[in-house]
Amino acid sequence: MGLRGWALFLAGLLLLAFIFSHPLALHLRSGMPYSFLPVPGLELLHQHPGDYLQLMYRFWLFEKALEGRTAFFSNAFEFSTPRTPPTFVTQGIPISFLFMLFMPLGNIAAYNALVVLSFLAAGAAMALLVSAVTGSPGAAAACGLLYACVPYRLGHLYGGHIGGFVFFLPPLALYCIERGFAAGGGGRNAFRWGLACGLCVLSTAMTELHISFYLAPLLCVYFAVSFAALARQAGRPAATRTALRILGGLLLPAAASVAYLLWVRHAIIAPSSVSGGRTLKNVQAFSPLLGDLLRKSPNAEKNIYPGYAALLLALWGILQRRREIARGRAEGGALLLLYFWVGLCALGYLLALGTTLEARVPVYGWLHARVPFLAFSRTPSRILCLALPALFVLCGFGLRAILSRGRPARGAAFLLVFLALADYHPKRPIGISILRGMDRVYETVRREAQGKRLLDLPIWPGDSAWSAIYEYYATLTGVPIVNGYNPVPRQRYVTEVFEPLRSLNVGELRAAQHALLRDWNVSHIVLHQDLFPRKVSRYPFRFTLRNLLDSPYLRFVMQEGPNHLFEVLDAPSGPPPAFCRRSPVGNLYPARSAGYEVGRRIQDAAASGGRAIAAVGRGEPEGMLFGGVSRFYPTGAFRVWFNLKLVAPPDDGPAARLEVYDVGKGRTIAARELSADEFGAPGGYRLFDLSFVNQESARIEFRVQRLGGSGLRADFAYVLFDGEEDPRPRYEAEDLYHIGRCIEDAAASGGHAVEISREEDPHMPMASGPERLYPPGEYRARFMMEAEDADEGSVALLAASSSFGDTLASRELAAADLRGPGRYRPQELEFTLDRLTPLQFSIRHFNRARLRFDAIEIERR
């Protein structure tokens, strides 16, 4: 392509960037992409946590390094405690240099500019490679357009993975090798091309470890194949001279890359929580299915769809290139190079499936156990960074063959490329997350916490993208935070920071923890209501908030939106807290998710969830029939019920033993043995309770031990605070899981109600819970609700379901249903239970009204 051709090509890439990123152009300074294929209706969210925030934070670190506020290659603004000194981080170099060019527009706009530029970089790199291999400018331009828009790249790009930004590096490195070995060059420019390839390798190592692990062996193979091809064309002496000059340029940056990767393994991976590598079970969770080859997936790691048009062009390219070689119209070594591209594409897609084909083709498992670094990756599809360049080189051969047949054929080629691009397009807006920016809470932190540290709650073990929001706020305040986000957090952070502070997730702050915060110079705590999933706590946000409000070690400062600010006091303002608060919410542990050492998981129509864990054989050993799942529980008195069935009495002695096990201390804190007589007449499930007391918050596991050769089945375990009784007739909205704000309202039954605005994210239910047991019967639930500023039509969806996921009844709530005299009008929902059922109620909102929810009442009909 000439200068004019390149200008048109880059303009086309720019146009595609805005088409494939719509509606990003409307939110360049206020929002960032979070998903290529968002859930329908969730295309526009507010403050959605994700990897994109971490990536922007890494770029921001480079800016702070240039300003002298932190050291280069240092991460001093997160995981900041005396026990966890700053870690090494590349700060996004070299991509962060481009980020700096757009910094005057603001962090968000600068990040979005890189999103757009990535289309140009990926497309141009692929066009260069295809042009060098096929010699066809038209095929090169078409393949560049396709490569820039391939769904796998866009899934990672919009998900905030830096691999989507540096997808241009593998084809660019291959292009440099290709140019270095180009026939007729005589090796004069080989050194420069080798150096350029080495810089690509070094840039990859510093930005995306997965691509780097795969790129190094690929370049070795391509170097050998290209050497053999040149030797057939120009003779071995000329090929050797060229190869040595390429190696001369490649050697230094390649050696630096290898040294860097070895250092990463020693200094970053070895002290991390994944130092032993990932198991094949970890890999299985991220392995694409065969069906993902046939359709686009909303999961970025499983979005391996190549496109039917691209596959057709690649197959046509293989056939046409093979025909050219057979007729002697190709240069020497062409067949070897063709085998290389075909093999790379096929092997790449095979390995991208991970463990999916392990039972039939156990290639990935074999490599996982033997190839260095591969065991540390749980995302097998990352190898597509190599397979996709090979796919589009083969497409280039196919397009070249079509374009050479005259004008009508060119129209067909244009149509194929257009159809491929249309196929790649998501057909709906991409996911955009609107960021709120600085609020009064973080403005106070920025003003009062300079030179100190901040703790954000909830606190995670470090590897959760939910914590990426904390990194975003760090870019606004410049105040170092105790916690943070890293896919491979240091084990030292987990054991010396997370575990000692974990009880703050349930609002429990004791003297020893207060001393830690003071020693670490933590002046403030921000509690985030909108970042409080059930993984954090077995109880709703309000339970944690009320405990923190009671704390003598904290002073509540303010609330704005979902953020609550506390100041850490120098000395306690009162006696140590008693931690006597309770929650009406129950916690269920179904058999379908429990672990076991004896027995097996079976279908059982009599069980509440239709499944049970059963041990019925006389020859089966004694051991744990139910357990294996531990959760963090606050201080307090509790009761746990086990739903069990005896199908065969024991040979002698008790039939079962119930246990409450403290995982952290490694001891049983409560136990009860059950005799066969306690089960009564055989044939049905019975509930057996066990009381226990947590003297302090702890990770608890509930177990059933099978004894005496009994035939035993376990359905579920179910936990309540002591004093709670089933069935409960009423729940206050503020005591359930909810989003929005808890407001004071004299008209509400408990003096408080839950209110949500139109801006709340509809992917989160307005309210849900309580996961409580109700016996068989006919029921009516009344949701006490009201609305303001409601659009016509449906404004919410009310639902009653079992905790096993079965919807028992649902109803769309219209704006007209909420009009009328009085406050908090009852909205009824009727349902029937045919067995003992753990119940969940939920309210889904549609962003069409300001809704308030007071309480829910349940009565028998």
Image (spheres, helix red, strand yellow):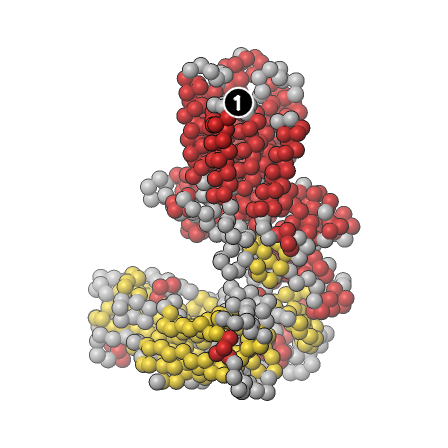
Give the residue drawn at x 55%, y 25%: 136
Give the residue drawn at x 68%, y 55%: 29
Q: Residue furthest right?
A: 68
Q: Is residue 272 visible?
A: no
Please indicate whether residue 598 sits to the left or right of residue 753 in the image. Answer: left
Q: Quadrant of the C terminus?
A: bottom left
Please indicate whether residue 834 sits to the left or right of residue 666 in the image. Answer: left
Q: Would you identify the image quadrant in which residue 510 lies?
A: bottom right
Give the residue drawn at x 46%, y 49%: 297
Q: Would you identify the image quadrant in which residue 830 lies?
A: bottom left
Give the residue drawn at x 55%, y 71%: 791
- Counting from the top left corner in percent of width and height, residue 781 is at 41, 80
> 635 or 143: nearer the eye?
143
Q: Amino acid at mark 1?
A: Ser
* On screen, residue 335 above or below 160: above
- Counting from the top left corner in percent of width and height, residue 211 is at 55, 40
* On screen, residue 477 above or below 858: above
> 687 or 232: nearer the eye?
232
Please indicate whether residue 403 sits to the left or right of residue 22 in the image. Answer: left
Count neighbours of disc 1 (C-alpha within 10 A) and say few if under 14, some if 14 to 19, many if 20 or more: many
- Counting from the top left corner in percent of width and height, residue 622 is at 29, 65
- Counting from the top left corner in percent of width and height, residue 719 is at 42, 75
Q: Secondary structure at mark 1?
A: helix
All told, the count of numbered labels is: 1
Q: Which residue is mark 1?
A: 226
Q: Is residue 841 visible?
A: yes
Q: Quadrant of the N terminus?
A: top right
